[in-house]
């Protein structure tokens, strides 16, 4: 049953995807670029900023907190910040839409400034756990109301006298790490986060670029990351590279469809984000990386993917943080591989934009693919993919895009019940894929 208000997409069997593209700016880096420039002194210029709903919500939030933000005719965005500790009291509640990264990082930014802000989001975001940031931010002096709740909407009362902490992350989460480090910026003394599993480090890299006093040491397999508070950030220019989590959909589409050969330029290749590429290469993918270089403190390069015969592999739990957003599309690649693919360490997938383990399992089964899942693992049996199913996206952009990709390689067209949600991260998805030769038909019959 298709729900009303949704905009279904039908993905038809396609082949010969060909072309050279760029994908839009990295979502994680885009959020951070807006937030750090919002509290820096002077004017920062951001190029390549992702123009998706999630990032627009962060941009609005930063403007409500006092940053002056203007879009330029050349597509860049200029941000004049408030200075560390200079965020102002917003006039109304702040709505982060679908974005966990937006609300969790912004909560960190606000937690040590004496303002009171009601934070909210869409139906998906209001189901996601916030205790992971509430706990450390409370230790730093912030208060959240209602006190007994760990879900949005919540009112955050920032600390007047913030206290620095040393916090060992209970989950491998770059969002929690970043929330604590950002709170540390307006806290006297040194705030330290200890992580056991390396998660994406864009906050640390960008803080360095903005002149923060940030350092890390590796001790007994753990990383201690420390930031000094009450140090002003200095505006800087940021070029946001293409998002590897968006590139992933086009890459897997090329691997599973006959005769395909695509190239994607300017893709972020930060080693904390490349677990999918490593896994696909182990599966036998014809995937190559060229023109590797450093730009704006991040590794970037060109990725070429060609139609490949994939084989099932076992993906270790330790790799999960470096590809946490890529499991839906990896499960799709696994459906086309010879043999089974086992993926471990997936507990965090249960608290993403949807319960992604359930959503992936249901989507695969709808399309005739045998798969099994436990609390924190997924196993997919590869083989010919019948397709023909209707997939429920549960307000989850990556479920929508992953199953659009499945439909391109399946024997029969696949219907994704809601294509609108894709705009939270990758509004150009259908257009870019169609440009490569993918056949998508939307609810109005337009291909
Ligand atoms: C992100 C961190 C990850 C990821 C999310 C973006 C970030 O979440 O799933 O899409 O930008 O810090 P967790 O930190 O909760 O794992």
Image: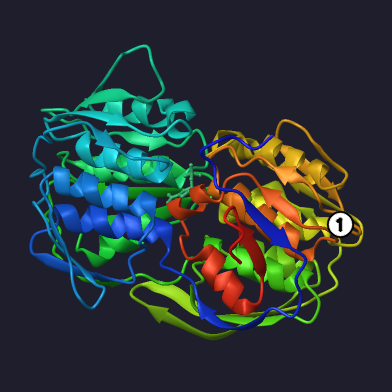
Residue 265 seen from this side:
yes
Query: Alpha-carbon neighbours of circle 1 within 10 Å: few (<14), some, or many (≥20)?
Result: many
* Residue under pointer 1: 385
In the image, farthest residue toward the front: 444
Q: Residue 322, image x and y in percent?
A: 57, 56
Front residue (pair 142, 75): 75
- In the rendered view, does 137 fall on the left or right side of 377? left
Which quadrant of the view contains residue 303?
A: bottom right
Q: Is residue 33 left or right of residue 410?
A: left
Q: Residue at x 61, y 65 (%)?
A: 248
Viewport quadrant of the N terminus: top right
Residue 282 position (above or below residue 57): below
Residue at 16%, 42% (x, y): give it: 186
Give the percent coordinates (x, y) of residue 107: 28, 36
Where does the image place residue 68, in percent across and percent down from the top left? 10, 56
Can I make out residue 324 in this image?
Answer: no
At x 83% / y 58%, what residue is drawn?
A: 412
Residue 114 figure quarter = top left
Residue 433 to residue 180: above or below = below
- Residue 102 x/y as whole percent: 35, 45
Q: Residue furthest bottom?
A: 291
Give above or below for 145 relative to 179: above
Front-most of residues 289 and 4: 4
Q: How many marks?
A: 1
Q: How is the image coloured?
A: rainbow
In the image, residue 303 sits, relative to residue 157, either above or below, namely below
């Amino acid at each position: 049953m298709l729900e009303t208000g949704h905009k279904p997409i039908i993905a038809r069997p396609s082949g010969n995807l060909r072309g050279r593209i760029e994908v839009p700016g990295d979502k994680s880096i885009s959020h951070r670029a807006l937030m750090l420039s919002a509290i820096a002194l002077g004017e920062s210029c951001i190029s390549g900023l992702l123009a998706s709903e999630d990032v627009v919500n962060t941009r609005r939030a930063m403007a409500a907190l006092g940053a002056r933000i203007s879009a330029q005719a050349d597509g860049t965005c200029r941000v004049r910040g408030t200075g560390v500790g200079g965020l102002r009291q917003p006039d109304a509640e702040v709505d982060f839409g679908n974005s966990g990264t937006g609300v969790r990082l912004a909560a960190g930014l606000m937690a040590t400034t004496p303002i009171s802000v009601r934070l909210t989001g869409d139906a998906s975001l209001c189901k996601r756990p916030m205790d992971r940031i509430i706990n450390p931010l409370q230790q730093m002096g912030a208060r959240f109301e209602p006190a007994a709740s760990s879900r949005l909407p919540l009112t955050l009362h920032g600390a007047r006298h913030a206290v620095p902490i040393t916090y060992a992350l209970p989950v491998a989460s770059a969002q929690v790490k970043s929330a604590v480090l950002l709170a540390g910026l307006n806290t006297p003394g040194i705030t330290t986060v200890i992580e056991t599993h390396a998660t994406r480090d864009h906050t640390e890299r960008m803080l360095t670029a903005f002149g923060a006093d940030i350092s890390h040491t590796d001790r007994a397999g753990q990383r201690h990351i420390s930031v000094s508070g009450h140090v002003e950030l200095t505006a800087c220019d940021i070029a946001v590279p293409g998002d590897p989590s968006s590139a992933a959909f086009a890459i897997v589409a090329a691997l599973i469809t006959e005769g395909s050969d695509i190239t994607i330029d300017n893709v972020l290749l930060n080693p904390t984000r490349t677990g999918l590429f490593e896994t696909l290469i182990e599966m036998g993918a014809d995937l190559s990386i060229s023109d590797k270089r450093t730009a704006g403190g991040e590794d970037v390069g060109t990725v070429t993917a060609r139609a490949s015969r994939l084989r099932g592999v076992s993906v270790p739990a330790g790799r999960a943080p470096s590809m946490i957003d890529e499991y839906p599309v990896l499960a799709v690649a696994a459906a086309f591989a010879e043999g089974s693919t086992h993926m471990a360490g997936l507990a965090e997938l249960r608290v993403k934009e949807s319960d992604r383990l359930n959503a992936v399992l249901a989507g695969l089964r709808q399309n005739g693919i045998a798969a099994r899942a436990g609390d924190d693992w997924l196993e997919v049996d590869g083989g010919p993919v019948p397709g023909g199913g209707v997939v429920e996206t549960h307000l989850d952009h990556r479920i929508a895009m992953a199953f659009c990709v499945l439909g391109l390689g399946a024997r029969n067209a696949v219907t994704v019940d809601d294509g609108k949600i894709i705009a939270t991260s990758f509004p150009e998805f259908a257009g870019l894929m169609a440009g490569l030769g993918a056949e998508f038909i939307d609810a109005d019959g337009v291909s």
